[in-house]
Image (cartoon, rainbow, N blue to C red):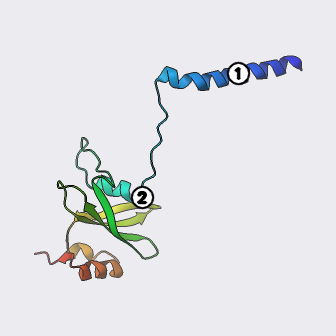
């Protein structure tokens, strides 16, 4: 009985040492990321093109404004207000699929009427009343 207790203490000490030494060996530092407001990950990804593009950052490159939820929070219309001169303000329409919001339209300042015809009526009406719909040729 005494032997198994000693083994347990040795194993526990080895685990503690391994946990303490691991960051030193790996050269890793504990990184804490600030929590981002909802939708910013999807919006940032919508603004990138290609594998080498850097994601724009909410609060530095853009700020979400006028975010409205429709149909039991299944649809979202939001505007990314540019905070620098390299991008324009853009609207995005997101749809909740499998519990995750995905950008289905945008970024853009206006959308063709043929595209908004597939949206729920309240979302399409909101965009139309906002003047964000144009007749496509």
Q: Name the residue under label 1.
A: 13
Foreground residue among 128 and 35? 35
Task: In the rendered view, tell whether residue 67 sits above or below residue 60.
Answer: below
As drawn, which residue projects farthest toward the left?
A: 137
Q: In the rendered view of the protein, which quadrant contains the C terminus?
A: bottom left
Q: Identify which residue is drawn at 32% across, 51% down.
A: 57
Q: How crowded is mark 2: few (under 14 residues within 10 Å), some or many (20 or more)?
A: few
Foreground residue among 60 and 10? 60
As drawn, which residue projects farthest toward the right?
A: 1
Foreground residue among 87 and 104? 87
Q: Is mark 1 on a helix, strand or loop?
A: helix
Q: Where residue 17 appears, x then y in whole percent?
A: 63, 21
Q: Identify which residue is drawn at 24% across, 41% down.
A: 52
Side of 13 relative to 24 (left or right): right
Q: What element carries label 2?
A: loop
Q: Identify which residue is drawn at 33% across, 55% down.
A: 59
State the separation of the CA atoms marked 2 and 1: 41 Å
Q: Which mark is residue 50?
A: none
Q: In the rendered view of the protein, which quadrant contains the N terminus?
A: top right
- Mark found first going from the N terminus, 2 or 1: 1
Q: Name the residue under label 2.
A: 37
Q: How many marks?
A: 2
């Amino acid at each position: 009985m005494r032997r198994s207790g000693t083994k347990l203490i040795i194993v526990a000490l080895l685990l503690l040492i391994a946990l303490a030494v691991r960051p030193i060996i790996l050269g890793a530092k504990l990184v804490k990321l600030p929590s981002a407001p909802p939708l910013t990950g999807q919006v940032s990804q919508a603004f990138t093109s290609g594998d080498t593009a850097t994601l724009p950052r909410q609060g530095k490159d853009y700020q979400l404004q006028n975010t409205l939820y429709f149909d039991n929070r299944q649809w979202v219309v939001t505007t990314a207000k540019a905070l620098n001169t390299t991008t324009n303000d853009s609207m995005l329409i997101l749809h909740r699929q499998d519990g995750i919001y995905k950008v289905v339209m945008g970024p853009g300042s206006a959308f063709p009427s043929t595209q908004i015809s597939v949206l729920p009526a309240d979302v399409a009406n909101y965009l139309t009343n906002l003047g964000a719909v144009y007749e496509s040729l």
